[in-house]
């Protein structure tokens, strides 16, 4: 019969999870077709609407209501449904399926037959009984058939099923009735279906949205807040929302939920991360495997725990590996400069897996014995800082002088403070050197007289040693100095009524501190009539001169300050040499002046010589952060005695105090390992004497003078420091690849033990006679002036390309000849000015000898004026030397020239003498020394032996 669609049973909404958006969902409140039993609606009057059973197109029994009072006028037949509870609904849909007969198809009904009916409703909160009052109903619409009939194939008219839907609402009561008013039509109400629309519960973006009834208006959207599924949370500022449309569709999703830390999304739910996995934040999508050195054995973890000994810094994200503190820094080395210590190290072998390694330094000052250490305190300065060091070096300043310190350098990283394991650090113990005292900060004017001013002051805050005196500088126009041993002084011999400026500085063995502030004091006015000796300017000068002499004497002879302190020869402003012998503990001297090197920084390459204490090798030194350099390494042979070790290292203690381009430079020592080593800058050309012999005649005079100038400059520096070398000789000068000559060989015992040239003299000492000044030979008067004598010999050695001074004369003969006034003649091709300088150096009276400062000046002048270095032909030597002024030799012991030449082992030159016309002893005797030398020079230009024998002969004949 009728084609009807199947719709869910009334009142039984079906829950659909995961309904796609746009799914239409209806809640059926009434479906007449679904009811098999009688509907039992109210029909009034009783002869109007009639309930009739029928079959649908599937032959399923259905209940219908029909009315057809078309013949009678004024029909008013009502049919009312049972009470329909509306539930949540606000808008109700009423779907009517009906057939309506065409009045034209009914004969005899003109005027009474209708083709419409009316639909009403009445809202109530409950059932109102079975009475029906028309005026309580609200009309919904007049319903007409779209088509009353259709035309059949054979021309017969067929009834057509009409469907009409009407909407009512918004409804406010709990329920309602529907009513159908027939006014004289022929109707079959085949089905009445009442429903409303709803958005069904749904999970979208991990949020649950509940069943939601559509809004009351056709156009309204109902906004619905979602609730996060378990183990999910709302995304920040983005809470989940959806909109339920009037058609029951979910529209416009906004915001979302995300799985909490430790959970990840699987479908529409959040599941815990498995063991060994974690999810640290709801923002992460996936669970991740535990990073290195961490683990977990629970599900749903937001992080993994660190393995034993590994840590995570507070700032470390859960995703990074657990880490540990770094190992200790490596290769810690230090450098001391007075009271400043520089430390350098290499990064630790193990950074603990982090890249935030910094360093901190812990400074402790230790007593010598027993070794007890206390923190250094706030007075010590660190540059760039004490902790948080990014670079691998630090300088520690303002340490106390002559104190023992321990420095620990620790590498730290972000987890060091979390670790309870033992601290790992590199440490060094260092004894500081000496430092000049700090300023005399305040000077008090005690008493001011006409010619004297009495001052007093406080000892400097940091004496850094024993203050041996104070220097008071005062000046009117030119500075004057006054020395005081105590912290007060009366400066006399001043001018009356004159303003003087005073400044004071303290002196220790380390030198002078800086001057304190200026203090201006005016002496009192002169009392008229009184006469003071010092008014006379001559007397003033005399007084100042006497004072100056006293100061000078004081400065030159130095002073001895206790057993621990050195004999110091001091000059204001100049560093003074300290004799390591004056140290109670020689090891302290070594470490005060020489840097302790790590043996691993030294690579020995080959043996280049033999020293007194062991082999001398060449090699390379690579200090951290510096370029590697060539070095000579002096080693101490195994099986040494304590004295040998001390003597060996003594050279380093001395050399370490020097810093001059013409004094061989000490790189450092290795005393904490074996072999004990002294590491010196490498001098490629070795000793000067051997070098010159190897390159005989190959240099220009300027080059030779340049070498001499270098040696003199090195000696000037040493003598200014108060150091007396005692063994200055070409063999003790080293030459580098640039022909720079440097003074070397500093050892206290070297003259005695080391130098093969040294011989015992009658004064008891062992002395290199040919190089030594007569006063040093005779009564051991070694001074810078005796070094100047030796320097003259070195000049001779240089100009004669390594000739042995006095050739093969015996030491005794040399002593005798010198005593008698003989001096070495000028070497071949030697400019006269140079020989003159040699002779000046060999003045018997040491006060007459030039100072090294003057020698440097003379040589500089020569180098600037090369003309002065020209050797006039035939005037190589001048008869100024007493040696050359000797009278004609006595040949009475010989009968012929041949016999004489034989006696002096020169017989092989007999023919030369004869050829030159010197056939008789008389003619030889008549030959001037000048001529004989010139002659020999011309004939045997490179034969120095002859010259030497000739010289010997001349000397002793
Ligand atoms: P010494 O013990 O100082 O007399 O040294 C022995 C030898 O080693 C010297 O004669 C030089 O040939 C050589 N020598 C010493 N020091 C150095 C150096 N710094 N550079 C090159 N050779 C050196």
Image: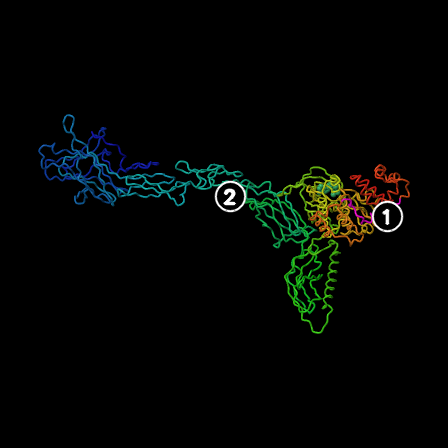
Is residue 633 visible in the rendered structure shown here? Answer: no
Which contiguous range is marked in magenta? Answer: 873-890
User: In the rendered image, which quarter is residue 631 located in?
Assistant: top right
Discs 2, 1 touching: Cβ within 8 Å: no
| Residue 469 placement (x, y as % from top left) | 71, 59
Query: Dividing the image into four equal quarters, which quarter contains ligand 1?
Result: top right
The question of residue 624 being in magenta is answered with no
Q: Residues within 10 Å of mark 2 (few under 14, many from 20)?
A: some
Labels 2 and 1: the sequence-earlier one: 2
Which label sits on residue 887? Answer: 1
Name the element at disc 2: loop
> Would you name the residue on which mark 2 appears?
316
- Please, is residue 106 above or below residue 709 in the view? above
Q: Nearer the viewer, residue 466 or 177?
A: 466
The label on residue 799 is none
**Chief SS of the magenta region:** loop
């Amino acid at each position: 019969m009728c084609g009807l669609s199947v719709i869910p049973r009334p009142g039984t909404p079906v829950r659909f999870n995961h309904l796609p958006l746009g799914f239409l969902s209806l809640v059926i409140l009434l479906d007449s077709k679904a009811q098999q039993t009688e509907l039992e609606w109210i029909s009034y009057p009783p002869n109007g609407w009639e309930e009739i059973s029928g079959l649908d197109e599937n032959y399923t029994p259905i209940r219908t209501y029909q009315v057809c009072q078309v013949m009678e006028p004024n029909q008013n037949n009502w049919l009312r449904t049972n009470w329909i509870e509306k539930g949540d609904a606000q808008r109700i849909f009423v779907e009517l399926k009906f057939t309506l007969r065409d009045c034209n198809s009914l004969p005899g009904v003109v005027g009474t037959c209708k083709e419409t009916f009316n639909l009403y409703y009445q809202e109530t909160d409950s059932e109102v009984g079975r009475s029906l009052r028309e005026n309580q109903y609200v009309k919904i619409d007049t319903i007409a058939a779209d088509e009353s009939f259709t035309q059949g194939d054979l021309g017969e008219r067929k009834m057509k099923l009409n469907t009409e839907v009407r909407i009512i609402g918004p409804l406010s009561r709990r329920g309602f009735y529907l009513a159908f008013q027939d006014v004289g039509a022929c109707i079959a109400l085949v089905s009445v279906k009442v429903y409303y629309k709803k958005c069904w519960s749904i999970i979208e973006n991990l949020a649950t949205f509940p069943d939601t009834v559509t809004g009351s208006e056709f156009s309204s959207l109902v906004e619905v807040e979602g609730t996060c599924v378990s183990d999910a949370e709302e995304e920040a500022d983005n809470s989940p929302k959806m909109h339920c449309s009037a058609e029951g569709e979910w529209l416009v999703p906004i915001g979302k939920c995300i799985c909490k830390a430790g959970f990840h999304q699987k479908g529409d739910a959040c599941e815990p991360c498995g063991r060994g996995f974690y999810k640290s934040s709801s923002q992460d999508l996936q669970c991740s495997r535990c990073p290195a050195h961490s683990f977990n054995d629970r599900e749903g973890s937001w992080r993994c725990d660190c393995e034993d000994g590994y840590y995570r810094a507070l700032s470390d994200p859960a995703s990074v590996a657990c880490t540990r503190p770094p190992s200790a820094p490596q290769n810690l080395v230090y450098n001391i400069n007075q009271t400043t210590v520089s430390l350098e190290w290499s990064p630790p072998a193990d950074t603990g897996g982090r890249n935030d390694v910094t360093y901190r330094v812990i400074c402790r000052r230790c007593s010598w014995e027993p070794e007890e250490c206390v923190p250094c305190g706030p007075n010590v300065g660190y540059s760039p800082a004490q902790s948080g060091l990014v670079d691998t070096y630090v300088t520690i300043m303002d340490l106390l002088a002559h104190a023992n310190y321990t420095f620990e350098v620790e590498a730290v990283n972000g987890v060091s403070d979390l670790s309870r394991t033992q601290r790992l650090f590199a440490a060094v113990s260092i004894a500081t050197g000496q430092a000049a005292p700090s300023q005399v900060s305040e000077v008090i004017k005690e008493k001011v007289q006409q010619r004297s001013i009495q001052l007093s002051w406080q000892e400097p805050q940091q004496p850094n040693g024993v203050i041996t005196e104070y220097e008071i500088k005062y000046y009117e126009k030119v500075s004057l100095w006054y020395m005081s041993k105590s912290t007060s002084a009366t400066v006399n011999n001043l001018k009356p009524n004159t303003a003087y400026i005073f400044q004071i500085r303290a002196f220790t063995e380390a030198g002078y501190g800086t001057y304190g502030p200026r203090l201006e004091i005016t002496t009192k006015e002169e009392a008229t009539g009184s006469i003071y000796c010092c008014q006379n300017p001559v007397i003033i000068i005399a007084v100042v001169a006497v004072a100056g002499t006293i100061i000078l004497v004081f400065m030159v002879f130095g002073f001895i300050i206790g057993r621990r302190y050195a004999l110091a020869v001091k000059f204001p402003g100049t560093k003074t040499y300290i004799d390591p012998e004056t140290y109670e503990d020689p090891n302290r001297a070594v470490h005060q002046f020489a840097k302790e090197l790590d043996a691993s920084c030294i690579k020995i390459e080959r043996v280049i010589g033999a020293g007194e204490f062991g082999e001398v090798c060449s090699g390379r030194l690579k200090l951290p952060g510096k370029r590697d350099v060539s070095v000579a390494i002096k080693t101490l042979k195994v099986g040494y005695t304590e004295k040998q070790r001390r003597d060996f290292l003594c050279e380093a203690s001395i050399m370490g105090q020097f810093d001059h381009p013409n004094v061989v430079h000490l790189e450092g020592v290795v005393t904490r390992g074996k072999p004990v080593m002294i590491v010196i800058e490498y001098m490629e050309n070795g000793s000067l004497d051997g070098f010159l012999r190897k390159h005989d005649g190959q240099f220009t005079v300027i080059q030779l003078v340049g070498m001499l100038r270098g040696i003199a400059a090195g000696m000037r520096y040493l003598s200014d420091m108060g150091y007396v070398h005692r063994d200055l000789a070409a063999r003790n000068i080293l030459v580098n690849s640039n022909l720079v000559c440097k003074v070397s060989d500093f050892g206290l015992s070297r003259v005695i033990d080391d130098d093969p040239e040294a011989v015992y003299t009658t004064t008891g000492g062992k002395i290199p006679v040919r190089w030594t000044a007569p006063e040093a030979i005779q009564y051991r008067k070694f001074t810078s002036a005796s070094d100047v004598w030796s320097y003259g010999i070195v000049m001779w050695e240089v100009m004669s390309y390594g000739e042995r001074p006095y050739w093969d004369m015996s030491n005794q003969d040399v002593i005798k000849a010198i005593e008698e006034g003989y001096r070495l003649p000028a070497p071949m091709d030697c400019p006269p000015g140079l020989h003159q300088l040699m002779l000046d150096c060999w003045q018997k009276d040491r006060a007459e000898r030039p100072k090294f400062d003057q020698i440097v000046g003379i040589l500089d002048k020569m180098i600037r004026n090369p003309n002065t270095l020209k050797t006039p032909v035939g005037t190589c030597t001048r008869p100024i030397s007493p040696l050359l002024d000797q009278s004609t030799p006595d040949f009475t012991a010989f009968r012929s020239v041949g016999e004489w030449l034989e006696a002096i082992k020169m017989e092989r030159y007999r023919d030369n003498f004869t050829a030159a016309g010197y056939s008789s002893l008389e003619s030889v005797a008549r030959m001037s020394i000048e001529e004989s030398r010139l002659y020999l020079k011309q004939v045997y230009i490179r034969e120095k032996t002859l010259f030497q024998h000739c010289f010997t002969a001349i000397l002793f004949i």
